[in-house]
Image (spheres, rainbow, N blue to C red):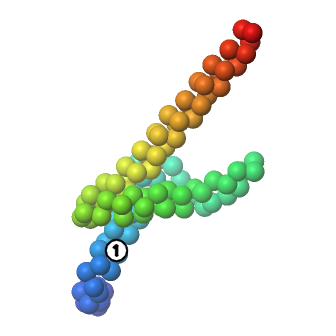
Amino acid sequence: MSGWIEAVRLLSPEVRSFLCYTVAGGLGAVATVALERRPIVPPRVRRGALHLGFAGTLVISLVAAHAVDHAFSTALIAAVGGGATLRRLKAAIDGGFEREHRRLDGDSDDE
């Protein structure tokens, strides 16, 4: 174990920060899956659509952790909250499109 610690100490501060935020992103992805009580699944194609599974969660968490990059704790929080925030935003956008489609369909029925 001390060999790893010495190896990390020899790295430049930028590389150490990158590794720290990457670890925070990975932990955030695992925490997100655990909190949502979903299984870790590999990417797959279902009905012609690509579902990224855990790989998608991991990418979102890593990007969120690196975007915040102030400290390990804030990177971890961003990694956990990033996926939930994006899912909520997507649901709101999808809901807006559905409402607009219903409105347009309703307007065309009146004519």
Is residue 30 something one can see in this rendering? no
- Residue 57: percent from left, percent from top: 49, 56
- Residue 78: percent from left, percent from top: 34, 54
- Residue 51: percent from left, percent from top: 63, 53
Q: Residues within 10 Å of mark 1 (few under 14, many from 20)?
A: some
Of 65 and 106, which appears nearest the observer? 106
Name the side, left or right, on which 50 lies relative to 82. Answer: right
Name the side, left or right, on which 37 lies relative to 75. Answer: right
Query: The disc labelled 1 sits on which kind of residue?
Result: Phe
Tell me where residue 27 sits by quadrant: bottom left
Tell me where residue 65 sits by quadrant: bottom left
Of 13 and 105, which appears nearest the observer? 105
Could you tell me which residue is drawn at 50 percent across and 34 percent down?
Answer: 92
Circle 1 sits on which residue?
18
Q: Using the image, determine if residue 21 lies above or below residue 28.
A: below
Could you tell me which residue is drawn at 59 percent across and 24 percent down?
Answer: 99
Q: Quadrant of the N terminus?
A: bottom left
Q: Quadrant of the C terminus?
A: top right
Could you tell me which residue is drawn at 60 percent across and 57 percent down?
Answer: 52
Of 96 and 23, which appears nearest the observer? 96
Q: Using the image, determine if residue 108 lies above or below residue 91.
A: above
Name the side, left or right, on which 43 lies relative to 65. Answer: right
Say what secondary structure mark 1 lies in. helix
